Image (cartoon, rainbow, N blue to C red):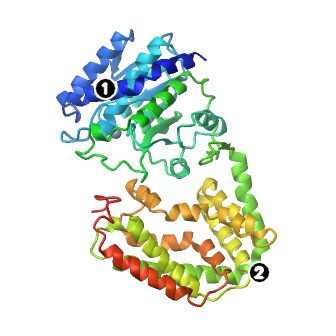
Amino acid sequence: MLWLCTLGLAQASPERILDYTEVVLSHGPRAHDQPGEHKTLAWVTERLRANNYAPQTVGDPGVLFACSGGEAQSGALWFLAHTDAVHASVPGAIDNAVAVAALVVLAEDLAAVPPPSQVCVAFPRAEELGLVGSRDWVANHAPPEPGLVVALDLVGQGQLSATGLGPLWGDEALTWLAQHREVQAPVAYRVVSRQLGIERSDHAPFAEAGVLSMHLLGRGRSGIYWPYHSVQDDLSQVEVPALDALHRTLIRMAHARPLPSPEPSAALILPMLGVVLPGGLVWLLWVAGLGVTPVAWRGWKAALHGLAASLVGCLAGGLAWGIAGWGRPQAAALATPLTLCWLLGCCAVLSAWPKQERAGQGGALAFGGLALACGLFDPIMGIWLSLGALALAIGKWRPLVGLLGAALPLYLCAPATWRELVFHHLLPGQGVWYLPLRALVCWPLAALALAVPRWRWAPLVLAGLCGILVGVTRFLPAFSTAFPSLGQ
Ligand SMILES: [Zn+2]
């Protein structure tokens, strides 16, 4: 419980991180090999020495690192923060001066209250040139064997999030991470890291080498850090509460019980609850949903109607979306007003579609079909849909429980989700792609909507509302501010 003592020290730490970030920015342009990067490395070295560390530099371009006292141990906890900025004109406050400052403050605090096992801080160079420093380090050098590598990149704003939780992360490792309640572990990132292995920071070479690793970053309201790689990435973007959460998390990680050795599983940390759903249970839920789906076979006609209604609805919504967004950047497709135009267009079509018998069972079949497709990619994606199938196939049609299964379709249709997927190059920037994909993920909801009693004026009212919103959206100057430069 020694780390509790450090919390007293940690209270002053956010301000210190802010001060140190200012110091790093005062060194001038930090694009790789520019004077600002060299000055930053010299300053970090000086701070580490002042706190009785013995910093070393290895490799080319050199990676500066230092470890807390004691013999080099295997299974050490490594924190990384790259020192370079992407371009001479980019101040790089969030990317990545804050991370450098935070690790220096962490090293200072750990010098005052040493952690129970070895903790190392490292400052790779040339990250922006393609993770050059960390790749060289993994390939050619073996300082204390890492047990867990945590790369800090884009911290200091938004909600602290753990991404890069790839296939090596299982029940126990995620339970270790879930202790740090201030860290979100977005499910979509977990799936991407498990199945696609797309990692974009210095932890990537470690993950490829079979070392348990992750990426700590801040996610803003849109999931994205707007001024990323732009001249706006300066000190004004830093949020002090985010520094506070970051430092407390780093201190807790440094003083936490050592990580168990990695045992891969399909576990995940449940959003909002922060509880780990073990991998075995994920598989069980997915299979249970698939198992009950055939029970709802009588709803096949409603399921087909649901699919047709979803496709036609999406086309109608797409028309509204196209008129509202005509001549605007493609990225505008991701803005909320356009999404609402699309949604109202869809709803107008759905409300005009003839009411269907057994629509609940149709919804169950739709959930089951999608659960199968998504679960074959990753059971973590399939379980949400399996829940819907389970809720609807067993017993009577239960709208409230069925809505549980709508979590994934609703999540996937939110503008912020699409924006984030496009930002990470997982979806093309052209908005036209969203329409068939949205039609597919909305299939179960469309099938369920066919159970709702019809009101004869509903199609007209919804179409009218859609028309008004399309007109208003045409005159909204800022409707695409959600992502000003993406896809242009
Ligand atoms: Zn970065």
Quadrant showing the C terminus: bottom left
Q: Earlier in the sequence, mark 2 or mark 1?
A: 1
Whole-percent x, y for residue 465 in the image:
45, 80
Location of residue 203 by image quarter: top left
Q: Amino acid at mark 1?
A: Asp
Residue at x 42% of width, y 43% of height: 158
Location of residue 358 by image quarter: bottom right
> Up-down: is 203 above or below 5?
below
State the CA–CA distance, disc 2 to disc 1.
66 Å
Q: Quadrant of ligand 1?
A: top left
Q: Is residue 401 left or right of residue 483?
A: right
Quick check: marks 2 and 1 in contact, CB under 8 Å?
no
Quadrant showing the N terminus: top right
Whole-percent x, y for residue 89 in the image:
18, 41
Q: Is mark 2 within 8 Å of ligand 1?
A: no
Whole-percent x, y for residue 154 in the image:
37, 40
